[in-house]
Image (spheres, helix red, strand yellow):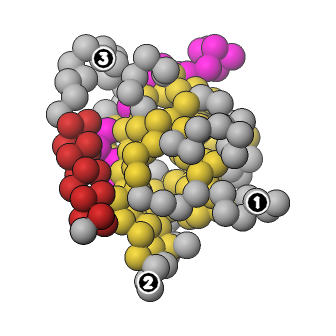
Amino acid sequence: MGRNRNVYLLSFLVICLSACNDDDIDIPYFDFVLYSPGSQDSGFGKAKVFDKEWQATASVYPFEFEPQYVSIRFETYSAEGFNRDELVFGNFTLKVGLYTVIDDPSADTNQDDNLIYGIYGQYQDDGDVIHGGYELDNDFPNTFYIERIDTIAHTVEGGFNALFKLRESYLHANLARQVLFEDGEFMVKY
């Protein structure tokens, strides 16, 4: 009974967040390059970015000294297999619920359990040179949610919405000033 109530409550929250009007967000169009999502053997992520479907490989990374805390990383790749962009949500335990995403990598065990961090970056060359660093736009309701955990198949499913703005030190580059990941979905093995 309690589990069904939680599923209904989470579904209601997701519907409410989906219904939020983001018409006030004025993001200039940018010809955002979509790279290969990779093998997606460990999981997948997808979202709408500049009216295109962005797809990535998803992976779970436990923290070395506190393995109950994890981050979920989404990566895309060049044709040669080099990392091109990376979206990370981190420092949380795997439990069903809605999380507020903030621009603070120190969000961890000392913080509210429903507060996690998010980062986004673009890479070039052989995947180890940052081409564009982004930070969360804290004026946007950045959210991440886990909708389902299958303890038999060891998978986690959920979604996200996050708006990132280009860090000042990268404003000289020909990059999108803002990148909005809308209606994001993921499934990842843990």
Judged from the image, the secondary structure of the residue bearing numbered disc 2 is: loop
Q: Is residue 65 visible?
A: yes
In the rendered structure, does residue 175 fall within the stretch colored magenta? Answer: yes
Disc number placed over residue 66 in the picture, else none: 1
Q: Which residues are the magenta region?
A: 166-185
**Callout 2, which amino acid?**
Ala
Disc number placed over residue 179 in the picture, else none: none
**Label 2 to label 3, Cα distance in Å?**
39 Å
Q: Is residue 73 left or right of residue 137?
A: right
Q: Residue furthest front?
A: 1
The residue tagged 3 is 25
Judged from the image, the secondary structure of the residue bearing numbered disc 3 is: loop
Disc number placed over residue 153 in the picture, else none: 2
**Callout 3, which amino acid?**
Ile
Q: Residue furthest right?
A: 65
Image height check: is 73 above or below 131?
Answer: below
**Label 1 to label 2, Cα distance in Å?**
23 Å
| Percent x, y of residue 164 | 49, 28
Q: Nearer the viewer, mark 1 or mark 3?
A: 1
Q: Is residue 50 left or right of residue 122?
A: left
Q: Residue furthest bottom?
A: 152
Q: Nearer the viewer, mark 1 or mark 2?
A: 1
Q: Quadrant of residue 135?
A: top right
Judged from the image, the secondary structure of the residue bearing numbered disc 1 is: loop
Q: Is residue 45 left or right of residue 8?
A: right
Q: Quadrant of residue 167?
A: top right
| Percent x, y of residue 19 | 17, 34
**Of 172 and 140, which appears nearest the observer?**
140
**Label 1 to label 3, Cα distance in Å?**
38 Å
Q: Earlier in the sequence, mark 1 or mark 2?
A: 1
